[in-house]
Amino acid sequence: MQKILIIEDDPKIAEHLQQYINKYGFESFIVDDFDRVIEDFQKRKPDLVLLDINLPSYDGYYWCRQIRKQSICPVIFISARVGEMDQVMALENGGDDFITKPFHPEIVIAKIRSQLRRAYGEYAVQAQEHVLELEGLKLFPERLELTYKEESVPLSKKEAELIESLIDRYPRVAGREDLLEKLWDDQVYVDENTLNVNITRVRKKMESVGLKGAVETVRGAGYRLTISWLKDDDQ
């Protein structure tokens, strides 16, 4: 059953959408804490997101950008804003479609089905998923997920790119300059501490699936993966 995440701060509209969506055979979830939108997204792993623009704290454009750092799942904006620029902003910030309020539920369902077909169904590009594997460690860069044995953890786009670079270079060292250039080539200058912070995050993600000490610092050179976890498994 495909899952729909509803990010709408009007409870009546959110519940109306949920009832109608569930009626058509989908499983839907409503975000109720608008400071934890990404946490809900990571927990639910939806196939599609319905996203309002006017939300508490941060608007829908912001949350769409955050979702795009982790996923390419379809995002449909639903808003009372009817200006052309609002629709342009929705698309420019990563949205796939736009529905104006008040809306007819049948239109919402039709657009949901259309986006799901394009992303996963008959209109989707049929290609084998790209997977990188090293001694039982699997990286799924397209879905931004890391797995080892029965454990899995979601990744940010930068974390996935870092791990991919480390796997590609294994057993060689991935140089600091090479990593900085590959991951932040659109920026003129990046503080090296940015790389340190992201490496720390990668190590924590590795540890969360049971791999401690998987990323080794090579002083004066960079970083490399170590398969020392295999020895730990044998003990």
Image (spheres, helix red, strand yellow):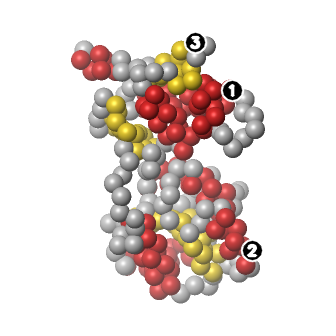
Q: Residue at x 56, y 69 (%)?
A: 96
Q: Amino acid at mark 1?
A: Glu
Q: Residue at x 44, y 32 (%)?
A: 168
Lower sequence index among marks 2 and 3 = 2
Left or right for 178, reference 189: left
Residue 225 on image: x %, y %: 44, 23
Q: Residue at x 54, y 66 (%)?
A: 75
Lower sequence index among marks 1 and 2 = 2
Residue 24 on image: x %, y %: 37, 79
Calculate the distance from the C-alpha at mark 2 to the C-alpha at mark 3. Answer: 50 Å
Calculate the distance from the C-alpha at mark 1 to the C-alpha at mark 2. Answer: 38 Å
Judged from the image, the secondary structure of the residue bearing numbered disc 2 is helix
Between disc 1 and disc 2, the foreground one is 1
| 15 lies above or below 226 | below
Mark 1 sits on what residue? Answer: 192
Q: Quadrant of the N terminus?
A: bottom left
Label of residue 219 in the image: 3
Mark 2 sits on what residue? Answer: 85
| Badge 1 density bin: few <14, some 14–19, many ≥20, Cα 10 Å | few
Q: Nearer the viewer, residue 66 or 105?
A: 66
Residue 93 on image: x %, y %: 65, 61
